[in-house]
Image (cartoon, helix red, strand yellow):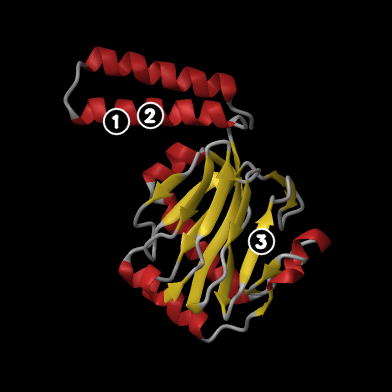
Amino acid sequence: MLVHLPSVLDHATLARLREALATAGWTDGRETVGAQGAQVKRNLQLPDASPLREALGRDVLAALARHPLYHAAALPLRVLPPRFNRYQGGGEYGFHVDGAVMALEDGRQLRSDLACTLFLSAPHEYDGGELVVSDTYGEHAVKLAAGDAVLYPAGSLHRVTAVTRGARLAAFFWIQSLVRDETRRRTLLELDTAIQRLVAGDADTTAVLQLTGVYHNLLRAWSET
């Protein structure tokens, strides 16, 4: 399931991030992947040890903390601190699957249930650069407004098409969800969305309360902490 998260960053935060990245010290993106990924990856990234990466990553996570759809769709338990990349001059990342287990900076492990890409460049600023996610329903190309993000299954086959004009800047990271199973996460998101619409429509309070109880009981039964 792909979930579009609109307006994660406001204009001021987006401008500040882009200004910082304009003078950043970039490194070869292949430094953060294994031998197989290095064969199909051609981009630039902020070094993992970069203080700028850490500071900008905090800004991204703070913005997501204020985004209700992010929490409803991802149900985050652990998050790998965001990384930042740049595609230009034909840079691309061929089809690949993300690693299943990743190391956090505090030594704990993260199971990568979901991946998130936050677009920092506007679509008119570059040609190509679509995030293409392949699933049982075919391939889905994603190219969003600057400040918007997309959630998608980390286990899916996906790629970034070649950027043939301009530069594509983005933040990306992985999430371990409270609910491992994608179908169950989708069910909870649909139920939560329906409850919010009923509340907004001034529906029967008792019925809304019962549905809210169903939501939390399902979350209680399905979550892993």
Mark 1 nearby-residue class (10 Å; few <14, some 14–19, many ≥20): few
Q: Nearer the viewer, residue 137 or 147?
A: 137
Residue type, numbered disc 3:
Gly
Q: Residue at x 50, y 19 (%)?
A: 218
Q: Quadrant of residue 17?
A: bottom left
Extreme-right residue of the structure: 35
**For the residue labelled by badge 2, is the local secondary structure a helix, a strand or a loop?**
helix
Asked if 221 appears above or below 41 in the picture, the reply is: above
Mark 2, residue position: 192
Q: Residue furthest left?
A: 202
- Count of marks placed on residues: 3
Q: Which residue is mark 3?
A: 94
Say which label, 1 or 3, has the lower sequence index. Answer: 3
**Element type where label 3 sits in the image:** strand
Residue 143 location, quadrant: bottom left
SS at mark 1 in the image: helix
CA distance for labels 2 and 3: 35 Å
Label 1–label 2 contact, CB within 8 A:
yes
Residue type (three-letter) at the residue carrying disc 1? Gln
Please tell me whether residue 185 is drawn above or below residue 141 in the rendered image.
Answer: above
Q: Is residue 113 left or right of residue 11?
A: right
Q: CA distance from mark 1 to mark 3?
A: 39 Å
Provide the residue designation for mark 1.
Answer: 196
Task: Identify residue type, mark 2.
Answer: Asp
